[in-house]
Amino acid sequence: MTQDRYQKGLDKLMEYTLTNNDDISTHLKITEDLKDLAPDVGKYIIQFAYGDIYSRSGLDNKQRALVTISSLVTQGTEPQLELHLNTGLTAGLTSTEIVESIIQLIPYTGFPRVLNALRVAKKVFNQRHITFSNSAGTQSY
């Protein structure tokens, strides 16, 4: 059963993981970085978060990514936000969807957290060479 959960989680995780860019944050890198200190954390991420939660029906990968990004913005957890902006892009979110979702949080979480999140988004877009279009024009990062 545990191996089934792990494999199910790993399969789901790979739907969110870009493997051809070593500059971006991934869950696999986190698991590798923690294997000598807390190896079970990587197992919990894969088995529980992705095997049990992300694999549920009812939301698609893009919707799950938006919920996660919104939660991380409101918590002010920029390192995890960077990771999940990458997973959201890999799941198919556009830069516009991400930016508009972050802006939507201003009334609920405030300008400081939104400004921090937008800086992280800009960094991720730059790392991934993503062009962003807004009402002021097109920007390449």
Image (spheres, rainbow, N blue to C red):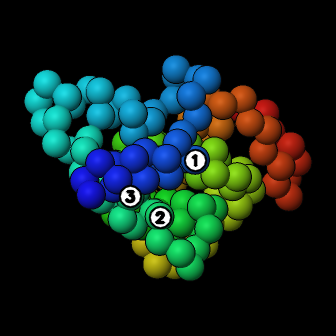
User: How packed is label 2: few (under 14 Cα within 10 Å), some, or many (20 or more)?
Assistant: some
Count the marks: 3
Q: Do the residues labelled 1 and 3 touch (CB within 8 Å)?
A: no
SS for dot 3: helix
Name the residue rendered at 33%, 55% in the picture: 5
Residue 19: x and y in percent read 56, 28
Find disc 2 in the rendering and name its residue: 55
Name the residue rendered at 52%, 22% in the picture: 23
Relative vertical location of residue 63 with respect to residue 7 in this rendering, above or below: below
Label drawn at residue 15: 1
Tell me which numbered mark, 1 or 2, is placed earlier along the sequence. 1
Relative to the observer, which residue lies in front, 47 or 20? Answer: 47
Specify the farthest residue to the front. Answer: 1
Specify the farthest residue to the left. Answer: 37
SS for dot 1: helix
User: How packed is label 1: few (under 14 Cα within 10 Å), some, or many (20 or more)?
Assistant: few
Amino acid bearing label 1: Glu
Residue 38: x and y in percent read 13, 36
Relative vertical location of residue 83 with respect to residue 53 in this rendering, above or below: above
